Amino acid sequence: MSAHGTYSRYNHGRCRCVDCKTANADYHGNLRSKLRLRPLADVPHGTTGGYGNWSCRCDDCCAVHRVAMAAAYARRKAARHVTVPAEGLPPFGGVGVRTERHPLP
């Protein structure tokens, strides 16, 4: 396995020590910098990648981003309000799970 403080150890070894986290942040910061040096003609407009990876704020990229964020919010909201039968669950009902025995507020 690779040494601590490397991107490889963070990514493949799943180490989350401060040195490995710093190496991962540096790696991705350099990668984003290189991607942004490419000509704007290469930006994939009208995609979430154009909005997130390229920081493009054209109308097409903003519209796609709004739709993607609305869908993500709907998925998270639906997951918060899942109701499952109380049978077969531990006495505490599970974390963040609505049950017939233990409803969430």
Image (cartoon, rainbow, N blue to C red):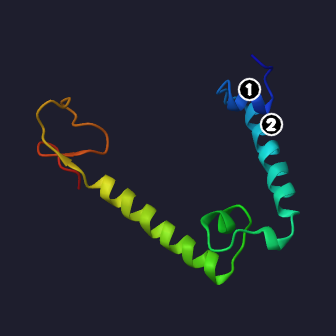
Q: Mark 2 and mark 1 in contact? Answer it, CB < 8 Å.
A: yes
Q: Residue 101: where, in percent of width, then height?
A: 12, 42
Q: Quadrant of the C terminus?
A: bottom left
Three-letter amino acid code at disc 2?
Ala
Kindly give the residue lying farthest to the top in the view shown.
1
Between 104 and 47, which is closer to the camera in this rendering? Answer: 47
Relative side of 95 to 40, left or right: left
Disc 2 crowd rating (10 Å Cα; few below 14, some 14-19, many 20+) is some
Name the residue located 86 percent from the left edge and 55 percent from the top edge: 34
Q: Residue 103: where, in percent of width, then height?
A: 18, 49
Q: Residue 69: where, in percent of width, then height?
A: 50, 67
Kindly give the residue lying farthest to the bottom in the view shown.
59
Q: Is residue 65 above or below residue 91?
A: below
Three-letter amino acid code at disc 1?
Arg
According to the image, label 1 marks what residue?
Answer: 9
Name the residue located 61 percent from the left edge and 77 percent from the top edge: 62
According to the image, label 2 marks what residue?
Answer: 23
Element assignment for label 2: helix
Q: Residue 65: where, in percent of width, then height?
A: 56, 71
Quarter residue 6 falls in: top right
Element assignment for label 1: helix
Quarter residue 92 falls in: top left
Disc 1 crowd rating (10 Å Cα; few below 14, some 14-19, many 20+) is many
Q: Quadrant of the N terminus?
A: top right
Quarter residue 49 falls in: bottom right
Q: Is residue 7 above or below residue 48?
A: above
Name the residue located 77 percent from the left edge and 47 percent from the top edge: 28
The alpha-carbon separation of the residues under discs 2 and 1 comes to 9 Å
Between 15 and 75, which is closer to the camera in this rendering? Answer: 75
